[in-house]
Image (tube, grey):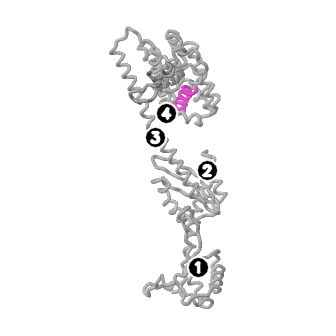
Amino acid sequence: MDQTQIKPTGDKEPQPTPDHPGQPADWKASAAVIWNSIKSYFNINSCLIPQNEAESAIREGVNFRGTNMLILIFAIFIASLGLNTNSTAVIIGAMLISPLMGPIIGMGLGVGINDFELIKRSGRNLLMAASFSMIASTLYFLISPVNEGHSELLARTSPTIYDVLIAFFGGAAGIVAVGSRSKGNVLPGVAIATALMPPLCTAGYGLATWQLHYFIGATYLFIINSIYIGAATVVGVKLMGYRHKAFIIPERARKVKRMVMILVIVTAIPSVFLTYSMIRENSFAMHASQFVEEEFQFPATKVLSYSAKTVKGKREITVTLIGKILPQDSLQLAMNGKLAKAGLEGASLTIIQGDATDARALKNEMASSSIKDIYQVAQATINRQNNTIDSLRYILREKDLADTIGAAIRPELEVLFPQVANIAVTSPIFNSVKSGSLDSTHVVLVKYTNPMGHATEQKFVKYLEARLGYRNIEVVNVGNDISFPSKNKTNISEKK
């Protein structure tokens, strides 16, 4: 009798697969389910409105006559007031009011669906809107009593690659919102993020005050925002599958797309160089801050202020110290030797020393540039120069004292400590190898004819401290390490 057991049909063994023999075959199905689940989060087809509805909304926003132009001019005046008073809230309000996004998105739609009439109409309206905006801003700043450039103005004059990315992703969010049923508050957010209004106001400020670097930088930022919002619109139109106009000439379409691509690339090139310069400047400032924090650590002298800037391609670091005046030459030499180790090769270091009064005068000098402060600035300059002279005099006095003190106390040493054969007094600055900190001390080098006892040596140290007026003197016995050939001997008293 056949003993083979027949298994139930519901308990089939897993079939091997060609890639993984003996493994279940449903892992591919599981992966497909997971992938489809992830893709469902990014599927926007069910959220989009018909193309004709989206086009109608965009074409309506392209029009810049009547109320749209008046609203734009009012928004320009609001933004100019915000820039003039350095008010971020007012600038944001002006960006929310501005209708400038319309023609920019219209140009992107025209390129995306090959509608050249829409491209021309949008470009013409954008040019007129930008021109009237600059004119209005220029007129405002011509009559404004405040002509000082605040931080909100300065921020619109140095566009970088980050502004390119902000404009592109802002434009992408804008076209998705225009083509979606649920627009929410995306468009106001895009208007704030891409900041189309402030550059036009800053350009007007540059024209009104005849500061062309403001005008050029702000205009370039506006061009970046316009082109990359439009480029993002073109990409969005392609991804949403909008139909092209059927009667377009293929060669003409290819030519326009090539021109758009060249314009996009050329516009981004200057921002790349500006970004590189910004990163270098930030790196220099960071290394300078770390250098000052680590190296300028003194017991009785503190850092009042410091600055790190690049002037005409030259990197300059200025450190202002307050408290006990340190030997200027030694300090400058020691710090210059540490610049390379701190990643500051080629940078020049200026160290300014003075007491509290001079430091406050210097701080006032840096904070004020009006004509009324000329006297204070001149006085602070004289004080700094006097401090430098005093520092040099101090160094010369200390050096002269060290050179002559041995001859001055020679008669006393012959009576009190006849064991002393030669003596030298010096005040070096020691540099810690591990921490890099600086510390000054007083060292007396002595050569004995006969050894001194411990008690006698202690008396000798106390005598030197009292006689020289120094504290914490270090006495070093040079023994026979230093020789004095007769031909090199010099009698200091005879020279006197």
| Local SS, label 1 | strand
The numbered dot on residue 365 is 2
Question: What distance separates the C-alpha of mark 2 from that of mark 1?
Answer: 46 Å
**Which residue sits at x=63%, y=46%?**
372
Which quadrant does the N terminus fall into?
Answer: top left
Residue 475 is tagged as 1
User: Where in the figure is residue 117, as x and y percent of width and height?
Assistant: 43, 12
Residue 217 is marked as: 4
Q: Nearer the viewer, mark 2 or mark 1?
A: 1
Q: Residues within 10 Å of mark 1 (few under 14, many from 20)?
A: some
Q: Position of residue 339 (x, y in %)?
A: 49, 56
Residue type of the residue flagged with mark 1: Val
Q: Would you identify the image quadrant in which residue 321 lies?
A: bottom right
Of badges 3 and 2, nearer the viewer stands 3
- Of the residues under marks 3 and 2, which one precedes in the sequence? 3
Mark 4 closeness class: few <14, some 14–19, many ≥20 residues within 10 Å: many
Q: Are marks 1 and 4 in contact (CB under 8 Å)?
A: no
Disc 3 marks a residue whose amino acid type is Tyr
Span shown in magenta? 192-212
At x 56%, y 69%, the residue is 395
Mark 4 or mark 3: whose residue is earlier in sequence: 4
Can residue 298 be seen here? The reply is: yes
Nearer to the camera, 124 or 181: 181
The circle on residue 299 is none
> Taken as a whole, is the magenta stretch helix, strand or loop?
helix
Q: Which mark is residue 276?
A: 3
